[in-house]
Amino acid sequence: MATENPDARRIGSATGGGRQEELLESLLKQLTVLTEEMRNANLIQLHRFMAEQTGRALADPALSEALSTLQGVSASKRRQLLFVNAHYSAIVLNHRLGAVDWNELIGHLRVWCVNRVFQEYWEMTGDHRKSLPRQSLEARVGQAVDAMMEELADGPDEWWVVGPSE
């Protein structure tokens, strides 16, 4: 005949409860990972859509004019600026997805800062960046590139040595 032992039942419950907490914690971690993967997949899909739209605009001057908000530029220059914007967006997306860290992002953008077309693009789109929320990734990247552009203007020899931190 089995003996009733309330203490043994409580220990069993605690052990089972501990296991349930572990299981719940594991499921929560998996759900968090899945949510992040879905977010990243959506960002990639959005970028793909924007890249397709930009590709169409690069091929058709009428679409290029419709997609661009920049005034007073030739059709050829507009296509260059749209291409630079697409590439810049891809570089930032790499960071957003975790493919590159902040220092790698800045390194890629530092190389772009010496590109004449990128410099023109950056100067022409300054007003666009002013409307960004100050703490957004885009605004922080913009501030870092602004700092690199200023450093480059001050002295290209020392410019490669120091860069902005996050």
Image: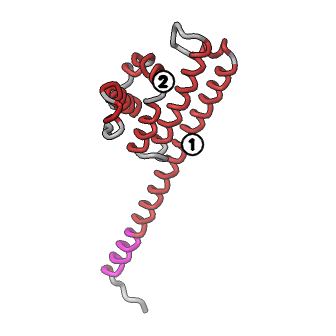
Mark 2 or 1: the one toward you: 2
Instruction: Name which residue lies at 38% across and 19% down.
Output: 131
Vertically, is 36 above or below 106?
Answer: below
Label 1 element class: helix
Which quadrant holds residue 60? top right
Query: If you read the primary sequence from the N terminus, does the residue marked by circle 2 or circle 1 appear first?
Result: 1
Q: Quadrant of the N terminus?
A: bottom left
Circle 2 residues within 10 Å: few <14, some 14–19, many ≥20: few
Please name whichever residue, 156 or 80, is drawn nearer the observer in this view of the structure: 156
**Residue 110 numbered mark, or none:** none
Instruction: Name which residue lies at 48% across and 21% down.
Output: 121
Label 2 element class: helix
Please name whichever residue, 139 or 160, is drawn nearer the observer in this view of the structure: 160
The spot of residue 105 in percent (x, y) is 43, 40
Circle 1 residues within 10 Å: few <14, some 14–19, many ≥20: few
Is residue 15 a member of the stretch shown in magenta?
Answer: yes
- The secondary structure that most of the magenta stretch takes on is helix
Q: Which residues are magenta?
A: 7-18
The residue to which callout 1 is attached is 41
Please name whichever residue, 146 or 24, is drawn nearer the observer in this view of the structure: 146
The answer to whether 28 appears left or right of 43 in the picture is left
The residue to which callout 2 is attached is 116
